[in-house]
Amino acid sequence: MNTTPANAACSGSTLGLLIRQVRDGIWARMEDELSKVGHDLTFSQYIAIKKLAGGIASVTDLARAAELNPGAMTRLLDKLEARGLIARVADPDDRRALHINLTEAGFAIWRDVDQCGTRVRERAMSGMSDAEREQLTRLLEQVRDNLSLSGD
């Protein structure tokens, strides 16, 4: 019988620190992978391109995905637009709103950087079986959902 308290295995500060270290490791490894293949992109730029590869998005959608404030996302988009990777198009139903999408050059970059993401994920999960990978994902989703402020 296990007499160790449930919270003794991983204190809240240890869990938070570990999750932060994993996130920072993924970001650093991703930027390293991008650099190795000649793409001068930050992790946040990668996230914006990834989101746009799935379709048109708003500044707010992109900021939420990259965990940036809208002002920082606008500056990030300015840089991607200057490189010809994205286009901002007025919403035909709302003149105040913009749709942001990838250009052909943006899709070309996406096809390449998506492989970088795959390599980082594989490195992060190396040595794990498919079942362990699925379990890790489910557990992290549960932690995220348990901490969500929505529905309180």
Image (cartoon, helix red, strand yellow):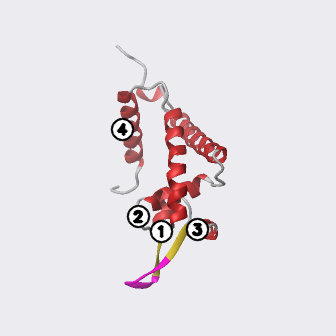
Residue 49 image position (x, y, % from top left):
52, 59
Asked if disc 1 and disc 3 are in contact, CB closer than 8 Å, the reply is no
Instruction: Report which residue position mark 4 lands on.
Output: 138
Against 56, residue 115 (above or below) is above
First reached walking from the N terminus: tag 4 or tag 3: 3
Q: Amino acid at mark 2?
A: Gly
Q: Is residue 27 above or below residue 62?
A: above
SS at badge 4: helix
Q: Crowding at label 2, few (<14), some or many (≥20) Cα neighbours within 10 Å?
A: few
Which residue is labeled 2 in the image?
55
- Give the labeled residue for mark 1: 101
Task: Give the spatial CA distance, label 1 vs label 2.
Answer: 7 Å
**Image quarter hosting the N terminus:** top left
Magenta stretch in the rendered image:
89-96
Is 65 a magenta residue? no
Tell which circle, 4 or 1, labels the residue nearer the N-terminal end: 1
Disc 4 residue type? Arg
Q: Residue at x 51, y 65 (%)?
A: 104
